[in-house]
């Protein structure tokens, strides 16, 4: 009989699996440093849980949130009508060219310099969750 099927080895495998899951969860909760290009975003947006909006809505928890759906922020009619959930892809498109992605939005930002920068910012934003 192989060792893996003995009760002792099954128990050890289960413990190892729990330890790995626990360490993976701890890593996932470790804050990720924003990309350098995010500095312009932080001039108008908060990124911490329960922070009030500033010039723009709070971006904490934006991943999966419906566009125009953050509480306590007065969105443009265009953003309210867009109403799609924010994914890495929709965020990247919006960051790259806000006027093209959501015509009529009120964000005073011309867009990222390049697709790689927009992707890095979008990927970072997707990590901002509790």
Image (tube, helix red, strand yellow):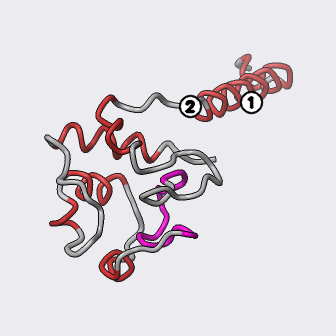
Closer to us: 83 or 77: 77
| Mark identifier at residue 18 | 1
**Element type at mark 2:** loop
Residue range of the region highlighted in magenta in the rendering: 59-72
Q: Position of residue 129 (x, y in %)?
A: 57, 48
Q: Measuring 39% from the left and 76% from the top, which residue is drawn there?
A: 83
Instruction: State left or right for residue 75 relative to residue 99.
Output: right
Q: Position of residue 108 (x, y in %)?
A: 26, 59
Q: Measuring 49% from the left and 56% from the top, which residue is drawn there?
A: 54
**Which of the 4 quarters of the picture holds residue 76?**
bottom left
Mark nearest the camera among 2 and 1 is: 2
The numbered mark, 2 or 1, whose residue comes first in the sequence reads: 1
Q: Measuring 15% from the left and 66% from the top, which residue is drawn there?
A: 100
Instruction: State left or right for residue 17 relative to residue 71.
Output: right
Label 1 Cα neighbours within 10 Å, binned few <14 / some 14-19 / many ≥20: few
Q: Position of residue 32 (x, y in %)?
A: 49, 30
Instruction: State left or right for residue 45 relative to residue 48.
Output: left
**Element type at mark 1:** helix
Spatial separation of the CA atoms under disc 2 and disc 1: 22 Å
| Mark identifier at residue 4 | none
Image vertical order of residue 116 relative to residue 98, above or below? above
Label 2 Cα neighbours within 10 Å, binned few <14 / some 14-19 / many ≥20: few
Q: Is residue 101 magenta?
A: no
Q: Is residue 65 magenta?
A: yes
């Amino acid at each position: 009989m192989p060792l893996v099927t003995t009760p002792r080895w099954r128990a050890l495998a289960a413990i190892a699996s729990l330890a790995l899951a626990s360490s993976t969860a701890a890593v996932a909760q470790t804050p990720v440093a924003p990309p350098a290009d995010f500095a312009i975003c932080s001039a108008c947006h908060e990124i911490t849980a329960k922070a009030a909006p500033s010039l723009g809505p709070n971006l904490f928890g934006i991943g999966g949130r419906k566009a125009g759906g953050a509480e306590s922020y007065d969105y443009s009619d265009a953003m309210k009508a867009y109403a799609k959930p924010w994914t890495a892809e929709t965020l990247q498109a919006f960051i790259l060219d806000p006027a093209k992605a959501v015509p009529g939005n009120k964000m005073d930002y011309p867009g990222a310099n390049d697709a790689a920068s927009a992707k890095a910012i979008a990927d970072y934003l997707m990590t901002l969750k509790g």
